[in-house]
Image (cartoon, helix red, strand yellow):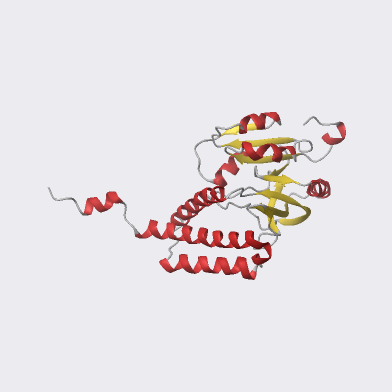
Amino acid sequence: MTQSPETSARVRLSAALIVKNEAAKLDACLASVADWVDEIVIVDSGSTDATLDIAAKYGAKVHTYIDWQGFGTQRQRAQAHVQCEWVMWLDADERVTPELKQSLQAALQQYQHERNVIFEFNRYSWAFGKFIRHCGWYPDRVLRVYRSDYTAYNDALVHESVVQPQDAKVVNLHGDLLHYTFDSLPHYMAKQTQYAGAWALQKQLQGKKVGYGSALSHAAFTFVKMYVLKRGFLDGKQGLLLSVLSAQFVYVKYMDLWLKQNTASAHDYEAKHPLPK
């Protein structure tokens, strides 16, 4: 990532990621940005594969935090290490296309003196063997680039998002961010199990109450919305699979929250119902 005099005069941009055991996808992600960003900042959660070796290959500045406190907090930690005026967030399974790169570089020059600008762009996701254009997955606009001294992610355990101050000006860029999400069904199930548990815990801490029927109604609506209203049927078998799996995910996360609120632990049960001596 050496800079020519021409490059050094441009707006400085950091690419930031939070990762754990992403060796299978990190190389392609970093390769899509390494030759045009000014620094790569990575916060690792304790990888045991070749993730850190790949990060070193691209000259990334790596910081390790193994006391996991949620996705939002981990992103906040990464941003604290960003040195450039602007930060672009990526996940290891994402790739910046040439069109998006050109659009972003032009926009940074155009808006470099506007502190309150947040850039968003479309994410185009691959799942189970094809890119998904329906199911509500595309266009999937994500806020990912902003001045590092202007805003940051919130501290949500999961489904974290960029905080938008009242004066924020959101600018949409051309080009897609490619998102190579689920490779297999076990990969999907493992990821969604993690998200469901984090979602239920977060809602429990917020005091959200749900009834048993909420799980069924939300799951049914999710399927109808994705497969019918969002025309998931046009994505073929993958569209049907994603709609069913998404409904299952919603059912599981609501049931997890319901169980946390309505069932006692084995320890509590035994305390109230001791065995006769």
| Quarter occupied by residue 23 | top right
x, y (%) of residue 92? 65, 42
Residue at point 43% right, 64% down? Answer: 210
Left or right of 269? Residue 42 is right
x, y (%) of residue 191? 54, 49
Please identify the residue farthest to the left as the structure is shown: 277
x, y (%) of residue 129? 66, 52
State whether residue 238 appears in this view: yes
Q: Nearer the viewer, residue 257 or 104?
A: 257
Relative to 186, say whether 206 is above or below.
below
Q: Nearer the viewer, residue 17 or 207?
A: 17
Left or right of 12? Residue 208 is left
Q: Nearer the viewer, residue 176 or 165?
A: 176
Residue at point 61% right, 41% down? Answer: 18
Q: How many marks?
A: 0
Left or right of 91? Residue 248 is left
x, y (%) of residue 203? 47, 57
Left or right of 180? Residue 67 is left
| Quarter occupied by residue 229 | bottom right
- Which quarter shows the N terminus? top right
Relative to 84, say whether 145 is above or below.
below
Residue at point 74% right, 37% down? Answer: 31
State whether residue 81 appears in this view: no
Please identify the residue farthest to the right as the structure is shown: 6
